[in-house]
Image (tube, rainbow, N blue to C red):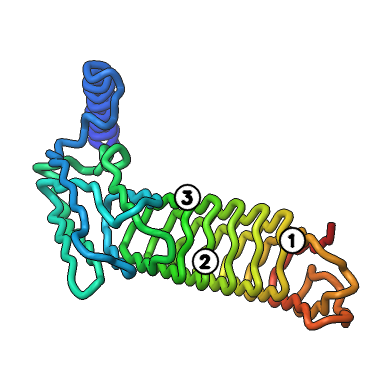
C-alpha cells in the first residue's frame, strides 16, 4: 500500500513539473502556438501559358482560396514536409501536393498552414476538380460549368458562386453557401453540416448518415434529403401549394400533392425537420 502511494506521489510530481515546464515554455514564446511549427515554407507561383478550362487540384494539408481572374495562375507554397507538383498539359492544369508527416523535424502540428494559403486564380466557365484528405477551401464570385470535390475532411465556403453542376463527396463535411446558384447540386457525406442562404437550385440532393441542414430563403424546384439522423430547417421562397411533399420517418412534415412538378422528398429515421414557405 505504501509502495502504491509512493508511486502515485512520484507520478503526480512528474505531472506537475511537466505542466510547469509547458507553461514556462509557452510564456517564453508568448503563447503563439504557430511557433511550435518548425516547418520551412518557400513561396512559389505559376502562370499558365495557354488557355486552361479544366483544373485538377489534390491537396493534403494546405488551405485553398479560389478567385476569378483573366488567366489561370497559382500562388502556392512548398514546405520541407510537402512537395508540390504543377503541370499544364492539353488545356488541363494539375496541382498535386505530396505531404509527409515529420513530427520530429517539423513539429507535431502544421499550425502555420493556415497562414500559408494556396491562391488559385481561374477564369469564368472553368471546370474545377478538388480532392484531398483535409480540405479548407474558400471560393467567391466565380462561374463554374462544373465543380467536384472529393475529400475525407472538408470545410468549404462559397460566396456568390454559380455552378452548372456541383458535386461534393466527403466523410466529414462542413459546407456553407451564400448567394449561390446551381442547376444541379449533389452533396453526400457521412457527417454533414450544410448551410445555404439566399441560394437558387433547380435540383438539390443531400445524402448522409448524420445530417444537420439549414436552408434559408432558398429558391428550388426539387429537393431530396436522405439521412439516418436528420436535423433540418428548410425555408423555401415559393408558393406552398405548388410543391408535392413526400416524407418518411418520424418528425417529418405531412405528405401532400402539389399543383406542379415541384417536389420535396425527405427520408430519415431520427428526425427533427421544419419545412416552411415564404
Pointer 2 or 3: first along the chain: 3
Q: Count the marks: how many? A: 3
Observer-nearest of 123 and 93: 123
Q: Secondary structure at mark 1?
A: strand
Question: Do the CB atoms of the residues marked 2 and 3 lie less than 8 Å apart?
Answer: no
Q: Nearer the viewer, mark 2 or mark 1?
A: 2
The CA span between labels 1 and 3 is 24 Å
Q: Which residue is mark 3?
A: 140
- Residue 260 at x, y percent in the picture: 84, 81
Left/right of residue 144 with respect to residue 250 in the rendered view: left
Left/right of residue 56 with respect to residue 185 in the rendered view: left
The residue at the point 25 percent across, 52 percent down is: 74
Q: Which residue is mark 1?
A: 234
* Quadrant in the rendering for residue 86: bottom left
| Residue 270: numbered disc | none
Mark 1 surroundings within 10 Å by alpha-carbon count, few (fewer than 14), some (14 through 19), many (20 or more) = some
| Residue 163: numbered disc | 2
Pointer 1 or 3: first along the chain: 3
- Residue 43 at x, y percent in the picture: 16, 41
Amino acid at each position: 500500500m505504501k509502495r502504491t502511494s509512493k508511486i502515485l506521489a512520484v507520478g503526480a510530481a512528474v505531472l506537475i513539473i511537466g505542466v510547469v515546464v509547458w507553461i514556462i515554455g509557452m510564456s517564453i514564446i508568448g503563447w503563439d502556438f504557430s511557433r511550435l511549427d518548425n516547418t520551412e515554407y518557400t513561396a512559389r507561383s505559376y502562370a499558365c501559358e495557354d488557355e486552361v478550362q479544366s483544373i485538377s487540384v489534390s491537396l493534403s494539408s494546405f488551405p485553398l482560396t479560389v478567385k476569378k481572374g483573366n488567366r489561370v495562375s497559382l500562388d502556392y507554397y512548398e514546405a520541407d514536409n510537402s512537395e508540390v507538383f504543377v503541370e499544364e498539359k492539353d488545356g488541363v492544369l494539375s496541382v498535386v501536393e505530396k505531404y509527409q508527416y515529420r513530427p520530429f523535424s517539423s513539429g507535431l502540428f502544421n499550425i502555420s498552414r493556415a497562414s500559408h494559403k494556396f491562391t488559385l486564380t481561374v477564369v469564368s466557365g472553368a471546370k474545377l476538380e478538388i480532392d484531398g484528405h483535409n480540405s479548407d477551401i474558400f471560393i467567391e464570385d466565380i462561374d463554374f460549368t462544373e465543380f467536384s470535390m472529393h475529400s475525407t475532411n472538408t470545410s468549404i465556403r462559397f460566396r456568390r458562386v454559380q455552378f452548372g453542376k456541383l458535386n461534393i463527396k466527403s466523410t466529414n463535411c462542413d459546407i456553407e453557401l451564400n448567394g449561390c446558384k446551381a442547376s444541379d447540386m449533389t452533396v453526400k457525406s457521412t457527417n454533414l453540416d450544410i448551410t445555404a442562404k439566399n441560394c437558387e437550385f433547380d435540383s438539390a440532393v443531400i445524402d448522409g448518415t448524420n445530417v444537420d441542414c439549414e436552408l434559408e430563403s432558398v429558391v428550388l424546384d426539387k429537393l431530396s434529403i436522405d439521412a439516418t439522423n436528420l436535423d433540418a430547417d428548410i425555408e423555401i421562397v415559393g408558393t406552398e401549394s405548388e410543391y408535392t411533399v413526400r416524407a418518411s420517418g418520424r418528425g417529418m412534415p405531412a405528405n401532400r400533392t402539389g399543383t406542379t412538378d415541384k417536389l420535396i422528398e425527405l427520408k430519415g429515421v431520427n428526425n427533427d425537420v421544419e419545412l416552411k414557405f415564404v
